[in-house]
Every structure is written in structure tokens, then in C-alpha cells.
Image: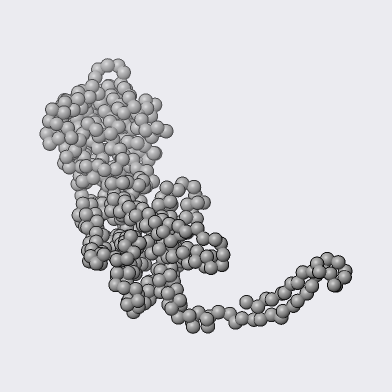
């Protein structure tokens, strides 16, 4: 912010530039990349003068693209950067000067606070004393890229008394050619500008693909059955493992349901100019919509239950680690109470901090996205921003949990596989069971989400597409995997009769015995006997 001394110095500078535009030097045009001064010497009486600055290949002022004409023409229909028409109430034969500013750095407003990288040209029209202006009409082409569209604008001029933009005596309009047009009455020696507010051109997400819906629906069924099976058979495992698995199933089930029914934003803001009739200075160059619909609530619930799931995943891993560490005494008696407090409380704290520090009713996009109901992560240029809650409210906590879970899995795998047995039949069966145990733990710890982090840092398109498919399939069917590993498989193992009934019937084949002799004499002792027995 500028101090009062800075404001005074800048005001004096802009007023000096106004006087410079009325200089009596023979050179009527001075152009710098970010500023231009143009003057017209009064010779013959005129009723209107027009200043035009055409767009060039670069974004600077160029001498051959700034034109000053004595004309009765209206605002140009060609692609121009800015244009000003000054109309006089009577014949005018005195000097007139213009100052073109590339931006509004010399005019720091207290009421208008820009947040986007948009440009606001300022035009100063200056006349000699005792010279009347009937009307000043000026137009500016909106300076925004394809990611933004104009929402509204205000026609203003700079008040040196208030040190701010004001709208007194100015009206606004929008031409069919796309220009925003302003008209101001009886103003001279003023700095004019058009303050624009833009919408971000959001690309709203499409409906969920049937693969995602099917995977999530199957996971909901699988998790419900798993939770029920764990409760029914809890006596055979003890209280702590059942508590952890049931909470994982519960949190993951709610997350899948929220994802299916709440990920898409039901309130979509259609882009396009929504110009109001009132000429009011906007608060910012980024038009902000107040919160509407249930999208913010769904975002908070999705964040909570997904963090809740991974918190319980981590607690399950900690329980496994404690069982290995205390193989005799088992899990400490205090662990279930601590697990309940941490499992349900830690995600609530993270969500509370995220909401409290970023969410405002008038600006919900500080917390969530507009395209779909999830945490905000990108700036207006669609670049990832670590200041957004997506990073510190989800990505960072989840990364810490995944690192912890990966370390627990490696420790578990090392403990159960550290022996080096000979590769006989019995050992192969044991090794298969050990590998299945490690895989089951990896599924329960949610380590498939590691593919999401790999996906974030991958730039190669084909690999990114493959990883997207893998990530989608693994995570939408995680509930199905848990059902198979923690309900169906234990149930079949505890009921061998069912397994036997599912096996294919055994078929015994005929035995054949034959002899081979090295010599043609059958009585030779150098013979080999083979028995072909295909029966299991």
C-alpha cells in the first residue's frame, strides 16, 4: 500500500503528465512501451476528436498504432485496444491532450481490489482552461484470455480528492461488436478507466462413468457384508481387530455413497456477460458468487470421511505393528480407546481448520472447487497452488499416512518372510500364504492411493492415461477387495465343506507300465522302468 506521501507524489506526477500533453512543442506524439502522450493543436474549429490505439502483436504501445483523428465517426467496430471520442458543445479550436497508461499502477483504489492478472488501461483527456466538453465517450476491449469471460463492468474516473475511482456523471453500455462503452458528461482533465469483473470459464465435470458407479456400488455391498461378518465372528478374533475393520468399512461405505451422489456440483454458473444496469464500482476483477446449494457440505463430508478412512487404515497398521512388537501380551489395553478418539477426532480437526481458515459464504471457492464438489487446489490459471486446502488439508496428511502405512507393510513383510526356506512343496504353500497376508495388509492400508501421487507427478500422456485407469479401478473396487480378503476368504477357509463342493471332481486315469532296454536283448540289466500315473 502507498503511504500518504506516495499518494501525493503520484498525484502530482499524473497531473504533470496532463500538463505535458498540452505542451507547445512541435512533436505531438511521445510513446514509451507502457505510456503514450498525444496532443492536438487547435487550428480549425472542430466538434469531435477521436483517439484510437490498435492492438499489436505485443502488449506495448507502438507509435504506428496510435491514431488521432478529427472525425464524426462513432466508436470503431474494428479490433482496438482502446478508443476515446471527445465531443464538444460548440466549435472547439484550442489544444487538447491525451495520456495513455498501460495499467492502473498510478491509480491505487481503496474500493476496487483486483486479484486476477487482468489489465486496466487508463486514458486521460485534458483541455485548456475555459474549454467545455459536452461528452467523453470511450471504449475498451476486455483484456482477458480464453479462461475468463466478462461478467460486468463500471465506467469510472479518478477523483484526486477521494484518491479513488468514482462513477459520477458516467453511464455504461455494451456494443454488439463486443466493446464495453462508457459515456461521461462535462468532464475535463480527468483520468478515465473501465473496471471489469470477470467470470472464470469453468469446465464442469460430467456425470460419473458407469465403471466408477459400478465399482463403488459393488464396494458398498462388499463393505456392508464385511462389516456384518466381522461383527458376527468377532469372538474368534478379539475386540480390537473387529473394531478397526468395522470402522474402516463404515467410513469407506459412507465415502462411496457421498462420492456417487454428491461429487457433481448441482448449481452451475453459466458463463457470459450479466451486465447490471447500475454503474457501480466492483469490489474486484474476479466476480464472486455467494455459496449456493449443497456442494460445500458435500465437500466437507467427502474430505472428512476420506480422511477418516485413511486414519483408520493407519490405526489398523499400528495395531499390526504392536502385535508383532508385543507378540506375547498383544495389543495394549489402552489402544481401543485411543484409536476411537484419534480415528474420529483427527479428521474432524483437519476439516475444521480447513473450513474455518478458507471458507466464506460470499467466497466459497476459497475452500472448494466450482467444477465439482471437492477441495480447492488450482488458481485461476489452472495451476496447482500449495496454499489451497487441497494440499495441506488432504494431500499432505494423506501422504504422511501412506508413508507410515508403507513402512508398516515393509516391516510386516520382513518379519514374516525373513526366513530363507528351501523351495520344497510345503514351503511354497507357506510362501504363498505369506504373500497373501502382505497383499491383504496392503489393501487394508489403502496403499493403492500411492498411484495417485505417481499420477500427479507424471507428465507422459500415455503413462498418465494408464495410471488414471489403474487408480480408478483399484480405488473404486477397494471395498470389493476388502470383502474378498476379509470376509469371503476367511468364511471359505473356516468351512472346508463348501470349498470341497466347489472343487472339480477328480478323474483317475489308467496306469501304463513300459520298459526301455539299451540293447535288443530283453534279459539285459540295463533297463529303465516308467510308470505313467495321471491320477492326482
Count of numbered tags: 0
Q: Is residue 293 visible?
A: no
- The structure's colour scheme is one colour
Q: Residue at x 29, y 50 (%)?
A: 392
Q: Is residue 519 above or below residue 278?
A: below
Q: Position of residue 521 (x, y in %)?
A: 87, 70
Q: Residue at x 37, y 43 (%)?
A: 145
Q: Is residue 249 left or right of residue 158?
A: right
In the displayed image of the protein, which residue is found farthest to the right? 520
Q: Nearer the viewer, residue 301 or 250?
A: 250
Q: Nearer the viewer, residue 266 or 248?
A: 248
Q: Nearer the viewer, residue 169 or 527?
A: 527
Q: Position of residue 432 (x, y in %)?
A: 50, 65
Q: Quadrant of residue 32?
A: top left
In the displayed image of the protein, which residue is found farthest to the top? 25
In what quadrant of the picture does the C terminus appear? bottom right
Q: Position of residue 234 (x, y in %)?
A: 32, 76
Q: Nearer the viewer, residue 286 or 252?
A: 252
In what quadrant of the picture does the N terminus appear? top left
Q: Is residue 120 above or below residue 510?
A: above
Q: Is residue 240 visible?
A: yes
Q: Residue at x 35, y 62 (%)?
A: 324
Q: Position of residue 17 (x, y in %)?
A: 22, 24
Q: Residue at x 20, y 54 (%)?
A: 356
Q: Quadrant of residue 437?
A: bottom left
Q: Quadrant of residue 138?
A: top left
Q: Is residue 146 left or right of residue 41?
A: right
Q: Is residue 516 above or below residue 318?
A: below
Amino acid at each position: 500500500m502507498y503511504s500518504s506521501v506516495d499518494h501525493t507524489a503520484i498525484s502530482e506526477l499524473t497531473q504533470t503528465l496532463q500538463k505535458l500533453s498540452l505542451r507547445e512543442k512541435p512533436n505531438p506524439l511521445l510513446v514509451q512501451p507502457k505510456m503514450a502522450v498525444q496532443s492536438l493543436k487547435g487550428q480549425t474549429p472542430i466538434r469531435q476528436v477521436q483517439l484510437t490505439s490498435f492492438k499489436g502483436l505485443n502488449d506495448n504501445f507502438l507509435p504506428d498504432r496510435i491514431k488521432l483523428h478529427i472525425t464524426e465517426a462513432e466508436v470503431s467496430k474494428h479490433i482496438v485496444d482502446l478508443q476515446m471520442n471527445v465531443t464538444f458543445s460548440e466549435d472547439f479550436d484550442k489544444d487538447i491532450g491525451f495520456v495513455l497508461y498501460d495499467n492502473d499502477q498510478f491509480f491505487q483504489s481503496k474500493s476496487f481490489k483486483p486479484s486476477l492478472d487482468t489489465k486496466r488501461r487508463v486514458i486521460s483527456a485534458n483541455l485548456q482552461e475555459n474549454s467545455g466538453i459536452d461528452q467523453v465517450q470511450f471504449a475498451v476491449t476486455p483484456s482477458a484470455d480464453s479462461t475468463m469471460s466478462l461478467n460486468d463492468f463500471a465506467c469510472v474516473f479518478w477523483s484526486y480528492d477521494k484518491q479513488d475511482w468514482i462513477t459520477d456523471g458516467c453511464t455504461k453500455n455494451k456494443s454488439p461488436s463486443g466493446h464495453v462503452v462508457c459515456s461521461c458528461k462535462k468532464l475535463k482533465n480527468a483520468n478515465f478507466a473501465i473496471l471489469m469483473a470477470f467470470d472464470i470459464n469453468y469446465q464442469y465435470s460430467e456425470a460419473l462413468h458407469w465403471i466408477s458407479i459400478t465399482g463403488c456400488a459393488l464396494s458398498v455391498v462388499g463393505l456392508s457384508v464385511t462389516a456384518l461378518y466381522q461383527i458376527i465372528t468377532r469372538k474368534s478374533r478379539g475386540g480390537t481387530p473387529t473394531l478397526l475393520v468395522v470402522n474402516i468399512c463404515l467410513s469407506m461405505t459412507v465415502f462411496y455413497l457421498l462420492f456417487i451422489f454428491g461429487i457433481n456440483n448441482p448449481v452451475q454458473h453459466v458463463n457470459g456477460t450479466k451486465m447490471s444496469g447500475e454503474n457501480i464500482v466492483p469490489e474486484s476483477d474476479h466476480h464472486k458468487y455467494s455459496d449456493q446449494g449443497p456442494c460445500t457440505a458435500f465437500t466437507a463430508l467427502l474430505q472428512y470421511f476420506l480422511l477418516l478412512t485413511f486414519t483408520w487404515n493407519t490405526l489398523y497398521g499400528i495395531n499390526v505393528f504392536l502385535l508383532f512388537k508385543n507378540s506375547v501380551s498383544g495389543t495394549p489395553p489402552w489402544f481401543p480407546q485411543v484409536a476411537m478418539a484419534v480415528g474420529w477426532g483427527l479428521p474432524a480437526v483437519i476439516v475444521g481448520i480447513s473450513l474455518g481458515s478458507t471458507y466464506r459464504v460470499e467466497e466459497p471457492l476459497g475452500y472448494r472447487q466450482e467444477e465439482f464438489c471437492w477441495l480447492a487446489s488450482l488458481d485461476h490459471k489452472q495451476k496447482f497452488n500449495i496454499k489451497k486446502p487441497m494440499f495441506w488439508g488432504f494431500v499432505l496428511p494423506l501422504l504422511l499416512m501412506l508413508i507410515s502405512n508403507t513402512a508398516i507393510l515393509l516391516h510386516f513383510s520382513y518379519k514374516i518372510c525373513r526366513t530363507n526356506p528351501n523351495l520344497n512343496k510345503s514351503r511354497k504353500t507357506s510362501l504363498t500364504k505369506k504373500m497373501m497376508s502382505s497383499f491383504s495388509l496392503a489393501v487394508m492400508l489403502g496403499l493403492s492411493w500411492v498411484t495417485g501421487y505417481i499420477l500427479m507427478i507424471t507428465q507422459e500422456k500415455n503413462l498418465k492415461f494408464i495410471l488414471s485407469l489403474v487408480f480408478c479401478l483399484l480405488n473404486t473396487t477397494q471395498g470389493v477387495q476388502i470383502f474378498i480378503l476379509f470376509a469371503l476368504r476367511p468364511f471359505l477357509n473356516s468351512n472346508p465343506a463348501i470349498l470341497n463342493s466347489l472343487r472339480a471332481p477328480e478323474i483317475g486315469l489308467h496306469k501304463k507300465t513300459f520298459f526301455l532296454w539299451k540293447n535288443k536283448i530283453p534279459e539285459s540289466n540295463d533297463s529303465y522302468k516308467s510308470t505313467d500315473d495321471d491320477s492326482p
